[in-house]
């Protein structure tokens, strides 16, 4: 029993789940306004976070199932492959079906409470994209721009919008500015994740965006997108706090600047290594350095999402200080 639970934890890629909790917190903080009826808030909030987490686990497990053969060639994923072998694909597929039905039940319950059919539409689109990202015949992860666009929708835009729309229909311009910034930031760090798998994907002719445009351009684009994303994210918070809340709380925006600078420093190192590798393609040690550095990309995504959570909580505090 405990062995099965441990194997399930490994194949569900728990390192990516904190970011999903972050999107829930962000969507909730931007959407709710005082005065609050706690009783009316608790049930929809519990259902929405459960739906997001179940959907994320389904997507990650599907990726483990359909990437098994590819992951088997990657020594860095040896633990994941061993866990999948011990657990078995059929058992994991059966679990995915159970999770889908559970998520569907939660969505219908949320619809009965909130009366918003668009929530079901967003959820079913997210599940379809999560499946199509990894599973043939579409396998969107090997289709360049479609790969990045799909990931962006599934792990950022749709979860935030789902929670936001659960509690309000007011899509104000400051929220949209913030969401655009977050999308660009996440997009940049997805690129760095693809850099980690560049060598295996290239050898197997899997056309991710990084394989298509090359290591150097992908690394440089990641730097540009994170810089632009950080500016737009900060602008969204700044304008929202200035317009009707507590402008003094903008002092906390330094957290975004500091976090982005930390990650940008790593991305610049990745860019330098990429240029060096392309100049000396036979230097396998450089390839190992690139793999080692870009393996931190889940941590970078977590940092970017956690600082957005921090500022969202500051924003929520500003609403109650009025």
Image: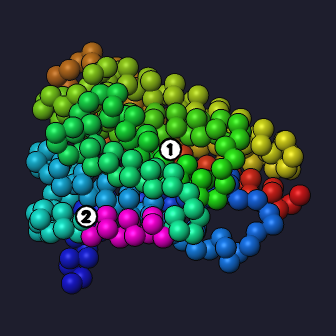
For the point 45% across and 35% down, the residue is 187
On the image, which quarter does residue 281 sit in?
A: top left
Residue 267 placement (x, y as % from top left) = 45, 33
Q: Is residue 70 magenta?
A: no
> Mark 1 falls on what kind of element?
helix
Q: Nearer the viewer, residue 151 or 298?
A: 151
Residue 96: image tag: 2
Rendered residue at 14%/44% (across/down): 70
- Locate residue 147 relative to residue 206 in the image: left or right: right
Quarter containing the N terminus = bottom left
- Residue 24 lies, with reference to residue 134, above or below; the image says below
Q: Nearer the viewer, residue 136 or 313?
A: 136
**Disc with the residue nearer the chain's start (2 vs 1):** 2
Mark yes or no: residue 307 visible. no
Quarter of the image where the C terminus is located: bottom right
Verify whether residue 104 appears in magenta: yes
Q: Main secondary structure of the magenta part?
A: helix
- Magenta residues span 98-109
Q: Residue at x 20, y 79 (%)?
A: 3
Mark 2 and mark 1 residues within 8 Å of each other at the beta carbon: no
């Amino acid at each position: 029993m405990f062995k099965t639970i441990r194997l399930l934890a490994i194949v569900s890629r728990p390192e990516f789940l904190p970011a999903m909790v972050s999107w829930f917190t962000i969507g909730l903080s931007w959407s709710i306004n005082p005065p609050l009826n706690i009783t009316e808030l608790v049930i929809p909030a519990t259902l929405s976070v459960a739906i997001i987490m179940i959907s994320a686990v389904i997507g990650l497990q599907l990726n483990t199932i359909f990437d098994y053969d590819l992951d088997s060639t990657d020594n860095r994923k040896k633990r994941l492959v061993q866990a999948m072998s011990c657990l078995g694909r059929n058992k994991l597929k059966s679990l995915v079906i159970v999770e889908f039905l559970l998520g569907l039940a939660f969505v219908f319950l949320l619809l009965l409470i909130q009366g918003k059919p668009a929530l079901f539409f967003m959820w079913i689109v997210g599940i379809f994209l999560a499946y199509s990202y990894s599973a043939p015949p579409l396998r969107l992860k090997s289709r360049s721009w479609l790969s990045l666009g799909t990931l962006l929708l599934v792990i950022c835009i749709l979860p935030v919008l789902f929670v936001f729309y659960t509690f309000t229909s007011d899509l104000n311009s400051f929220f949209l500015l913030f969401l655009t910034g977050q999308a660009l930031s996440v997009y940049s760090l997805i690129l760095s994740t693809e850099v980690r798998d560049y060598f295996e994907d290239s050898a197997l002719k899997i056309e991710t965006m990084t394989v298509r445009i090359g290591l150097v351009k992908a690394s440089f684009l990641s730097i540009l997108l994170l810089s632009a994303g950080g500016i737009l994210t900060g602008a969204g918070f700044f304008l929202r706090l200035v317009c009707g809340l507590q402008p003094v709380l903008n002092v906390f925006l330094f957290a975004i600047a500091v976090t982005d600078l930390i990650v940008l420093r790593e991305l610049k190192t990745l860019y330098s290594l990429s240029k060096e590798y392309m100049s000396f393609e036979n230097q396998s040690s450089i390839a190992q350095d690139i793999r080692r550095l870009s393996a931190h990309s889940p941590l970078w995504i977590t940092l970017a999402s956690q600082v957005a959570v921090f500022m969202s909580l500051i924003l929520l505090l500003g609403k109650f200080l009025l």
